[in-house]
Image: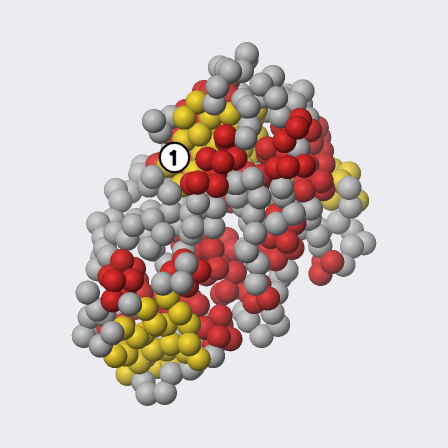
Amino acid sequence: MSLPADVVERCRADARLAAASRGADVTIALRDSSGEHVLRLHDGRVAAGRAADCSIAMADEAWSALLAAEPSAGDQHVLALVRDGRASVEGDELAFAQHLHLVRRIVEAIRPAAAAPRAPERRPLSLRGQYVRIDGPQGASDVFVERAGTGPQVLCLATAGSDSSQYHGLVAETDVTDRFELIAVDLPWHGKSTPVPGVDPLEYRLDPATYTQLIVAIADVADLRRPILLGPSMAGAAVVRAIALHPDRFAGAVSCQAGPSVRGRSTPALRSAVVNQALHVPEWTYGLMNPASPLEHRDRVWWGYSSGAYGVYDADITGYQQWDLDEVEHLLTPESPHVAVLSGAFDTSVPPAASRELADRIPNSSFELMPELGHFPHAEHPAAFAPHLERAIARVLRSERPPADTMDTTS
């Protein structure tokens, strides 16, 4: 299947594309085997164009996969197809980076609408917020902490560049807090937490050792009693490292969307002075979610990344790419606290094979595939994530004497 003949008409009728193009002036072409469709996007108006600033070209079968009403894992976003060679960007690559939000919305305007998930019932708000002062490796900082629920404590860490608001849906739309206390935190420089006084905000840095020290410092000052650690992406690697180095401080960990190492997650555009970070950073991450996850929650993930301070996401990603299981693997034994590894199938940055390898290399671990979720399982669809999370926590809690073999719950 090639591109539909009425590409321009569909895009012109899309209200979200019109809103996204306010302030823009760019011409984008989509190319298939039959030719190209050229779109001029100018200050909230969409029309047919002529000479394109940049073009997205791919074979008909790739367009068919991308434009399916419910695309398969790995086919959901242009960036994933560019990375694996099924799509190419021609022309001005800077224009493409500057207008990635428009490229994504053009695809969504052309793609047939999928059935919206049933809206969950919202629960009464129960979050309790406070600041705690930590003395971290870079100096003192006031760190924001949100708590909800009762029961075994779960210390919740956010993805690179984000904050505790990612866990709002898990508290407000699931009953997880009926059985567990969730404690979500903002690292220094993130969310409501403060930068370290005396340090230039543009000099913010994070590395695996610093992250581990911050986790321990936060757990100590918040008076957490051997909590379970929960982290996705960068935090998913950090919780594994914390278990390896501090097995007596934490009861175990739920590691989401992490592998033995990570590479290729940084580009110059993440800190470029000519690319709007409030647009590019959220678009760089948006395509790692399942398009069938609720739009409300995908929009929240986008908004959270759009709200981040300049340079924080890039600094986090730079530190994340220093993670390597080789450095701590020798400390993880059958007697170490259990690490439950979860993997969303739609994550093309850390695919399930990488997370499965991570679990295979940790003696006391388990692996579970989440076929309906992507890189932000806790935030993009909290109601779908909650059952996976509770099974993972159960494996941690019942692993007082670690099993001899790694359990694979997908078999």
380 relative to 220 in the view: left or right = left
Q: Position of residue 194 (x, y in %)?
A: 69, 49
List x then y, in percent, for residue 277.
55, 65
Q: Nearer the viewer, residue 138 or 351?
A: 351
24 or 145, which lies in front? 24
The structure residue drawn at horizontal position 22% and vertical position 77%, both measured from the top left corner, is 34
Q: How far from the left and from the top, in percent, is residue 253?
A: 55, 28
Examine the image and state in which quarter residue 247 appears. Answer: top right
Which residue is painted at 56% across and 67% down in the image?
Answer: 269
Residue type at tag 1: Leu
Decide: few, some or many residues near mark 1? Use Cα within 10 Å; few <14, some 14-19, many ≥20: many
Residue bearing the label numbered 1: 369
| Residue 363, horizontal then vertical, whole percent | 55, 23
Taking depth in this image into account, of 129 and 399 the one nearest to the observer is 399
- Identity of the residue drawn at 37% across and 43% down: 345
Q: How many marks?
A: 1
Res. 109 in view: no
Find residue 121 and report its image quarter. top left
At x 55%, y 28%, the residue is 362
